[in-house]
Image: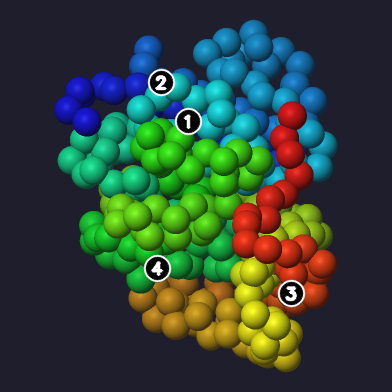
Amino acid sequence: MTEANFPVSVVVAAWPDTAGLLDCLGSLLRQSDERVQIFVASPMPLPADFARNFAAVRWLAAAPAALIPNLWSLGMAAATGEVVAITTAHFVPAPDWIAQIRAAHRRLDSAGIAGPIDPPRGGSLGDWATYFLRYSTGFIYHREQSVHDLIGDNASYQRSALQAHWESIRVGFWEPEFHRRVLAEGRTLVFVPEIRITQKFSFGVSRFCSQRLNHGRHYGRDRMRGKPVLFRLAGIVAAPLIPFVLLAKIMARLMHKPGYVLPFLASLPVLLLFIFSWAVGELWGYLSRSAFDGPGMAHGPISA
């Protein structure tokens, strides 16, 4: 992409409520131009005065049971920009977020490009626990580099790459699955440290436990789909190790961020609750009937 201000579409998933949405949209609108589309996809009712206060933002209504991957797909279906950037209402993009996304996609012919997520300074223990579980994968990256996975909450994709795999992401953009597909084609994913976004809110402890349960179940179903019986049995037997493996990975990443040790220790009890919720969901996915179906993608609820 050589055009300086090529069209960019931004999809903001507002789930399970609209907490943080005003701050997120405020940052986006301050840096937008006439070639930036902004969509909010949410299962929540359209807030009063939203159309008047955010005339440049299009609200996409989703089914009540929709999860964040379903909301991202809903926005991607409406997007027309050459690049589609995704995030959630709980984040505030840096003032140059869109400019950095454009600059990165002009330089790099990569299917997906993402950046780091800055921590919830002054946040609750639940905020920090969410941060360590969901976003610590970015701790190990300190420079621009090709990677095997991106954090979807601060990611952008060539729309042509999304269109090439539309049938697999039509009802749910589960980013690890999409990343595996484009890497298998020989495409690249790149981490760019200048594309920054800050976590300001979290989902709350009970809601995030429910989300981790559902996302873990999806992951377990997809991981076992089409696999031999012995592979599935081995996964079920080894499932009690899942929490220990997840915690060990987070602690290994923490070595790259020694300044985060104190909030990690303080939030550890909540973090363990989130980890066990995922582990139960993953085992549930291993045991579900759909895990024994033929090859294919497991999707969440269809967004409307």
Q: Position of residue 173 (x, y in %)?
A: 57, 46
Q: Earlier in the sequence, mark 3 or mark 4?
A: 4
Q: Earlier in the sequence, mark 1 or mark 4?
A: 1
Mark 1 nearby-residue class (10 Å; few <14, some 14–19, many ≥20): many
Tell me the SS state at disc 1. strand
Q: Residue at x 44, y 27 (%)?
A: 9
Q: Earlier in the sequence, mark 3 or mark 1?
A: 1
State if disc 2 and disc 3 touch (CB < 8 Å): no
Q: Label 4 to label 2, Cα distance in Å? A: 30 Å
Q: Residue at x 63, y 45 (%)?
A: 172
> Which amino acid type is shown beneath numbered disc 4?
Phe
Q: Position of residue 241 (x, y in %)?
A: 66, 89
> Dot 2 corresponds to which residue?
36
Disc number for residue 125: none
Q: Is residue 154 left or right of residue 18?
A: left
State if disc 1 and disc 2 touch (CB < 8 Å): yes
Q: Earlier in the sequence, mark 4 or mark 2?
A: 2
Viewer-nearest residue: 182 or 190: 182
Viewer-nearest residue: 126 or 218: 218
